Image (spheres, grey):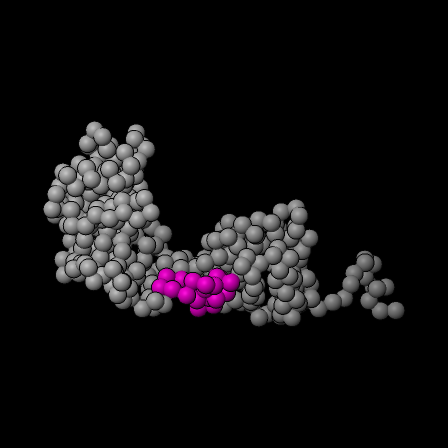
Amino acid sequence: MNESQIAEKVQARFGAKVLRAYAFRGQAAVTVAPADLRDVLVFLRDDAELQFEMLMDVGGVDYLAHPDAESMDWRFEVAYQMYSLSKNHRFRVKVAVREDALDVPSVWDLWGIANWMEREVFDLFGVRFTGHPNLRRIMCHDDFVGHALRKDYPINKRQKLSQPAENILCAKPEHA
Amino acid sequence: MGLEAQINQPFIATRLDEVINWGRKYSMWPMPFGTACCAIEFMGVVSSRFDVSRFGAELVRFSPRQADLLLVMGTVTQKMAPVLKQIYDQMPNPKWVVSMGACASSGGFYDNYSVVQGIDEIIPVDVYVAGCPPRPENVIGAVVKIMEKIDREKAADWK
C-alpha cells in the first residue's frame, strides 16, 4: 500500500479521532490525540494489510512561533515513524500534545525500542510518557534544568555538571 | 690536566635539567582522549605515513597513569567534562596537554546547550592545534612545540 492509502484506511477506521491528515511530497501522516494513540498504533501493527512491526523513530516537535501553529491548538507533537518489514511500506503518526497536558501514553510495551526513544523526547522536550518504566534523562546530564530543544530554551545556555566522574561512569540500575 | 686524568672513564659534563629534559622530550607517552573525528586523524599521526615515532611519542597508552601527554581530540560535552578532568588528574607529573582541533580548543561550531566551549574551561592546555580536523603535520607540529616547551622547563618545577 502507498502512504495515502494507509492514511485513508486509518481515517476509515478511526474517523473523527484523526485530528489532522496531510501528505507532503508523497509522505502521508495523521495526527491524533494522546488518548487515541495506542489504539491507532496497535491497529497499524496488528492489521493484516499493514503489519507495521518496526518502530523506526520517535521524535518531538515544538511548534512555538511556527507558521503552521495558528491552525493548531497544541504546541508539541510527538512523531512516530513506522516501517513494515513484511510489506515494505512506511507511515507516520503524530500525537498532539498541549502545553498544559504533557502526558502521552508510553508504547514501550508494544515496541521495546520506544523505551530509549521516549526518554530522548522526554529529556529534550519535556513530554511525559505515562507508563514508561524508567523515564530519566538520556542525553543531557542529571543536573540539567529545563528541556534543551524547546524553542524557548536559550540557544546557547550551558549548564555545568557538578558531579564527579564516578557518578557518570558507574552505571545506575536501569529500573531504579 | 684536571678531571679527565683523574677519572679513567669517558664522561661528559652538563646540567641536570638538560639531561632530564632531553630524556623527557624524546620519550613522550601520549594518552589519547578521542571523542570525535580528530581521533581518526590521530590514527594517521601514529601510523607509518606520518609516523610520530620519529619524535619519540608513538607508544600510545590507554591508561592515564602511564602517560604524560594528554591529547584531547574532539568535542567535549558538559556531560563528558568531569571524565576529562578525572583523566587529567590521574596522570602523574610531569604532564602536558594538547588540544587538537576546533571543538576541543573552542567548542567549534557547537555553540549550543551541551558542548564545553574549549577544554581550557576544565584543564590547563599547553598547545592548541587549529583545524577541523587538523592535518597530521599540524599535530606533529604540536608535539614539537611541546618538546620546545620541555626544553625551557626546569625539572624542579614539577613536584
Q: Disc count in the image?
A: 0
- Is any part of residue B145 visible from this angle? yes
Residue B154 drawn above or below residue A135: below
Residue range of the region highlighted in magenta in the rendering: B102-123
x, y percent for residue A162: 33, 64
B147 or A158, which lies in front? A158
- Image point (36%, 52%), residue name: A169
| Depth order, front residue of B27/A113 | A113
Left or right: A89, with B48 as reference point: left
| Residue A20 x, y percent position in the rendering | 19, 50
Residue under the image location 21 percent in, 48 percent down: A21
User: Closest to the observer: A1 or B158?
Assistant: A1
Observer-nearest residue: A19 or A99?
A19
Residue at point 20%, 43% (across, down): A107
The quarter of the picture where the N terminus of chain A appears is top left
- In the image: residue B147, left or right of residue A48: right
Q: Position of residue A64 (x, y in %)?
A: 25, 63
